[in-house]
Every structure is written in C-alpha cells, then in structure tokens.
Image (spheres, rainbow, N blue to C red):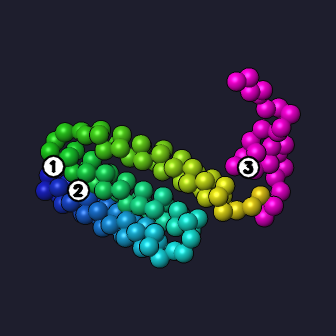
Amino acid sequence: MIEDATLIAEVVVSFLLVVAGLFGLVGSLGLVKLDDTMRRLHAPTKATTLGIGGVLIASMIYSAVFLDRLSFHELLITIFLLLTAPITANFIAKSYMHRHVDEADLPPTEGPYGWAVYDAVPEDERPIDTK
C-alpha cells in the first residue's frame, strides 16, 4: 500500500517536472525567437511562470511524501511569482508603448482619460505645482 502511494507520488512529481521543463523551454524559445518586445513579453510571463510553478509544486509534493513534512516556502514563492509576473509585464508594456507607439495609432478608448500611458489625468484636473 505504501509502495503504491510512493510510486504514484514519484510519477506525479516526474510528470510535473517534465511539464515544467517543457513550459520553461517554450518560454525561453519564445523569448529568443519572437521579433519585437511586445511579442517577446508574452512568452516568459506566461510559459516560464507556469514552468517554475510546476517545479515548485513538484517540490512541495516531494517534501510532503518523501520527507514527511509540509513545506510552504514553495507555495509562497509560487504566489509571489503569480502576482509579480503580470505586474512586471504591464510595466514593460506601458514603457514600450510610451517610447515606441504614437497615441494617434491606438484605438479610441471609452473612458475620459484615454490611454493611461500617455495622459492619465486631464489638464484641467492636474494638481497645481507650487514649487
């Protein structure tokens, strides 16, 4: 009975590591092969994050089954990565748009502020600089 559970855990951990490696490979190839920043940005933020998450989940399962202890460090790292990767990608995309895309080339927005990268607050609502 215990040997069957150990075998299943080994298979699950191995599967997660292989899938995580494939995601990491796809993310790395996308980073190298895609031609501009906006396309390159998608590969590492999605695929590599899933790859690292797979390795960390495999590590959690391994420590729970084979070392008989729960490890929450990997869970915290996974949560941190899932929270920070989209924010970082958003900042990179906004800075790319600010430097390389003219506001006139963008589709119109329905909000009163337009594209936040270019003009977040209308001129008449900006605070007065008293310095």
Nearest the viewer among 16 and 124 is: 124
Mark 2, residue position: 9
Q: Along the horizontal axis of the image, is 98 left or right of 87?
A: right
Q: Earlier in the sequence, mark 2 or mark 1?
A: 2
Q: Give the alpha-carbon distance from disc 3 to disc 2, as whole Å.
A: 52 Å
Is 114 magenta? The answer is yes
Q: Residue at x 84, y 43 (%)?
A: 112
Residue at screen point 38% across, 46% down: 78
**Residue 19 in view (yes/no):** no
Q: Residue furthest front?
A: 131
What segment carries the magenta color? 104-131
Position above or below: 32 against 119: below
- The amino acid pointed to by label 1 is Phe
Q: Is residue 126 above or below residue 3?
A: above
Residue sitting nearer the eye, 100 or 11? 100
User: Which numbered circle lies on residue 94?
Assistant: none
- Examine the structure image and report whether residue 111 is included in the region drawn in magenta: yes
- Majority secondary structure in the magenta region: loop
Q: Check residue 118 in the rendering and tell me which mark sits there, or answer none.
A: 3
Label pair 2/1, CB-CB below 8 angstroms: yes
* Amino acid type of the residue tagged 2 in the rendering: Ala
The number of numbered discs placed on residues in the rendered structure image is: 3
Numbered disc 2: secondary structure: helix
